[in-house]
Every structure is written in structure tokens, then in C-alpha cells.
Amino acid sequence: MEETQMSNEYIPFLSEIKDVIKHTDIEYTFRMAYVGDVKPGQFFEVSIPKFGEAPISVSGIGEDYVDLTIRRVGKVTNEIFENQVGQTLFMRGPYGNGFDVDLYKGKELIIIAGGTGVSPVKGVIDYFGEHREETAGMTVIAGFKSPKDILFKDSIKRWETQMDLIVTVDKAEEKGYREGMVTAYIPDLNISDLDHVAAIVVGPPIMMKFTVAELMKRGIKEEQIWISQERKMCCGLGKCGHCKMDDTYICLDGPVFNYTKGKKLFD
Amino acid sequence: MGNLFKKEEAVLLLNKLSDVYDIYAPMVFKGEGCFSDTDSIRYGKITSFDDIVWDKKSDYSFKEVLLPISDTILYFTEKEMKVPDPSEKKRIIFLRSCDLHALKRLDEIYLTNGAEDFYYKRARENTKLILMGCKKSFDSCFCVSMGTNQADNYDAYIKMDKESVYLEPKDEELKTLLEGTESEEASFEIDYVTDNIEKVTIPETLPEGIQDFPLWEEYAGRCVGCGRCNFVCPTCTCFTMQDVFYQDNQKAGERRRVWSSCQVDGFTDMAGNISFRKDQGARMRFKVLHKVYDYKKRFGYHMCVGCGRCEDVCPEYISYLACIHKLGEIKDGGNADE
């Protein structure tokens, strides 16, 4: 029949869970079998029949896998957490534009991320961590609520040897942690050539707003800043309307935006 | 040139068309209106040309023929999935000019904004569109202002009176079907509205920061967030994915997409208690600016087709037209309330 020849984007594929990396009680990374083009910051619709679909951004990329870091906070994600290595999940995607690492090559790269906002940008940090010769400098500031909320502890150990890394928590009961908001560290950032800075800011809307403002105080221009927006991407295909902000479909045109465009978006 | 059928010949014609097509038109659903003892006029399968409602505007648009309110997109049985079979028959939809223009908006979202939508496309490809003329404007119509009072993307034109049915086909498939039917050759002009009581002038540009203007505040108190304006709108296309499993067999179920509304709670909710546009004023602003501003910024023409159904249906008597008028009164950098 001719209908079967038309592609149907809504049909998910089965992907095996190759590994589960536990970061916190409610945040795990699921390493999912996947071979194909994918960029950091893109997302997949992950589903379990009967429970539904949820958009999850790519937090790591390997030759035959993608990492999906998932927080257990909803109907679908609760159910995903019931699955173990060797079991399968349904996925469709990847969707969205993702981060284009070519834009940041040769730049003094500043990446500032908060909480689960580290996930979409983690692939960029991993890439330039491994290819430091492709940057003119690299600083990463990652903020979390408290020490027990810190994600990607294994990656953080590696990053410490590869780049200037500041991991900060809003508040720590115990010693040995930097405290304070990510914005507190911006005034002291070493910047050698303002014209060659590229900055990426990902986190909750309020965090992105204040972080960008702080970066601009340092003389970094809007066009040198990229953000990633998180919205309810129900279909991922520009149809369902849930992620629309004014004339922009986050699932198609984003979630990554240069700030010159990103600052104009409103819900 | 077209074919003029006497009433008894028209019965044969409809039978002939019904062999190939499911035929949808606005019809009366007795006693199914929102209030007791009122009727609902909406799209259904007709069995006679006399079922078609001409003298009133349909409360709901044609869109549910192509985009059902609840549309099964996958059947699940454990790890297996199946795409529902397409409908066995092709379709004919009788619709007015404004709705034909609305169809262009549905096509834009479902066929060109991002990947083609499998389900919409297979329904759309097998659908013939028959234009119903409008002899007069109904209350709250403003098609002339929106430039949707005339259409040309139809497959045939239909005109009826008590004695006869006139059908003028443009589409080859319909022309072939009409060959050899008992009818007379005839030619009629297409009826269309040239003037509405309601007129709007939509501002070309809106000042920056329009989302924070006080004009939206009144809607925060008035709108009850029922979403009817979205459901009657022929250009609203939003849906939500929903998994449903059968009560007597928890291993089998289906994934559906169901209509959703930017006015109803939950539309923007994300896991972790994050949501946007919490008050109804912001939701009204989101909807209105989409209809007359944001959509145009993206696609080059207005989304709103001026059918006025949202105006007719609001239980709080919130006037979309009045809102557009207020936008028109805003001067650059000014404020509607000043």
C-alpha cells in the first residue's frame, strides 16, 4: 500500500538500556543504544506505552549510544526509572537544532549551567574537553542546589584536569564545596580577548536571565551568547503547539538560540 | 459550467458520490447544543443534500473531519505497534470560503512546519473540498476584513435551492463522476459576502513589550479558561499525546492525540512543577497574538480567518473582536488604556 511508504515520525524505535549511571536519588543517566547523527542539546521523545512520552535532552554522545539524563519527577520518568540495563525503552528523534560545536571553535569558551541544565550542554563540554586545542580558553561554571544534587561527578573529575572548572552549590551543610550562585563567579572570570569570547548559558529561565546580564556587564555582546530553552515539547515536530513562544517553535527552531534571538522570545 | 440536478436526480447523485466518498457537511444535531433544548450545528456524514445547513453558521468547523478530536495514532500490544488503517472511503467536505482559507492554515502546520504529518497527509490527500457559497454574512463574521470571503482552492462549487442542486466541478475526478448523470447544463455565479457588519483593522506592527500591556489584565478576571474558543476555531491545531490502555487487557492499548487548548490549565506544564502563562490574561494574549501577529511573522499571512465562531461561543461574552479593536487603537510606544 502506498501509505506505508510515507514516513511516519510518530512511530518510535526500541532502544536497549546499555548502562544506568546514578547521580542522585532522582537523577540517573540512561545510556541508550543509538547509532546516527545527533548533536548535544538535541532531544528525544522517550516513551513507555501506557505512560506516555517525555522529551529528554541528549547529555552525552558515543559511537553506538546516546546518554539521556533523566530526573524522576513525572508519570513517564517515574516509570522509566523502573527499567534496568538490558531492558528497552521506546524513542523517537533526535529533534531540535542542538549545539553546533563549529560555532565555538577557536573561541574563548565560557559555559555556565545550572542543575539539569548541565545535561544539554554536557556534550559540548565533553567535546572541547577532549579537543582543547580547538579552543582559545575554556571555563565551565556548573551550579547545583546542594552537594547531593551534583550531577556527572565522574565527568567533573575528568573536566577538572581539562579546563578551568568551577562547581558551586547554593548551600552546603558540609565543608569542601564552593558556595554561591553561578553569577557570583562571573566578575572574576579571566578573559584575555573579549572579541573572541563565546558563552553558553543553560538553566532555569531566571538563572539564564541573571547570568546573561552578568556576562554582558563584563562586555560580552548578545551575539556572543547562546542559551537553550526548555519547554513542553509534546510532539517534537512543530505540530502540537505546546512549546511555541511567540512566533517560534522551540522544538524546530531551538532549543538552542543565539541570545539576539533568544532574548526576544516570550511565553 | 456546471450541472443542475432536480431534487430527485440529486438523490441519485448523492448515492453515486456516497459509493466513493464519505460526505461531510454542517448538519443539525438535535438537542445536542450547550444549553437544554438547543441544537448543535457541526460536521457529520450526510445522507441527503437536505441535511446540509445553509441558513446558519456551523458552531464547530470542518476541522474535526481531518483532525478528529481524539485520533488514535498507534495501537500497542506489548512491544508491538500498529498504525491504524486508513479510512476505507475517500472524503468530501462541504465548507464555506472562510473554512477553505482555514484549511490552508492547517496544511501549513501539518504539512510544511517541520516534518509532514503522516496522519493528516493521508486524510488530506483523499479529501475533495466543495465550496458552499454565502449569500449573506452571519453575525460576527468578518471575513471581508480578513480577505477570506472568496476562495479558489476548491474542487467543486455547490449551490442549492428548494427544487434543485447545482454542482460545478473543477476537479477531474469529480468531473468524471458527474459525466452521464441526469442533469442539465447550467452556470451560476459563486455567492460570496462583500460586506460584514463587523470590520477589523489589524495593526501591521505592535509595540515592543505588548505582552505586558494592561489591556490583557481584564481577561485575567473574565476568562474562565474553558477552551471553547480554541475548539470552535477552524485554525487552532494544538493537540496533546495521550496513552490509553484497555481496562480488561492492560497489555494492549493505544496512543492518541487529542485536541488541546492554550486557554486550559496544564497546556505548558512541564515535569517538576514548571509552567508558563499561569493567568488567563496571559493566555488570552498568547491566543490573540498568535491569530493576528505571531503566525503572520512566521508564515506571512494572518492565522485568523474571521469566521467569528470564538466570538459566538464564549460563555463569558469575551469579544475577540473587541480585543482586536483595542490592539488597533494602540499607537507605537503608547498604551491602549491611555
Image (cartoon, coloured by chain):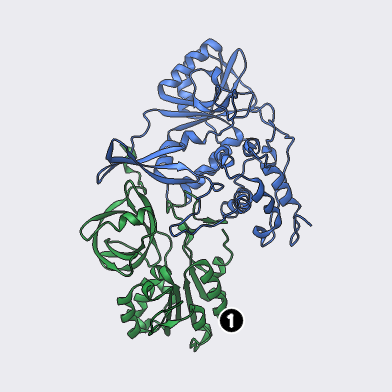
Chain colours: A green, B blue
Q: Position of residue B299 (x, y in %)?
A: 56, 51
Quick one: label 1, few (<14), some, or many (20+) residues within 10 Å? few
A149 left or right, relative to A227: left
Residue in the image at 49% along x and 69% along y? A227
Relative depth, front residue between B22 and B331? B331
Residue lying at the far top of the rendered structure:
B8
Which secondary structure lies at badge 1? Answer: helix
Relative depth, front residue between A161 and A42? A161
Instruction: Please tell me whether residue B220 is drawn above or below residue B72 in the rendered image.
Output: below
Q: Amino acid at mark 1?
A: Lys
Instruction: Please tell me whether residue B151 is drawn above or below residue B293 in the rendered image.
Output: above
Residue in the image at 44% along x and 25% along y? B22
Residue lying at the far right of the rendered structure:
B338
Q: Position of residue B333 (x, y in %)?
A: 74, 62
In the picture, which quadrant includes the C terminus of chain B?
bottom right
Chain of the residue under label 1: A
Where on the picture, by quarter, is residue A72? Answer: bottom left
Relative depth, front residue between A50 and B164? A50
Residue lying at the far front of the rendered structure:
A173
Residue in the image at 33% along x and 37% along y? B84
Q: Which residue is mark 1?
A: A217
Instruction: Please tell me whether residue B260 is drawn above or below residue B181 in the rendered image.
Output: below
User: What is the count of numbered marks?
Assistant: 1
Q: Position of residue A195 (x, y in %)?
A: 53, 83
Q: Position of residue A238 (x, y in %)?
A: 47, 52
A151 left or right, relative to A226: left
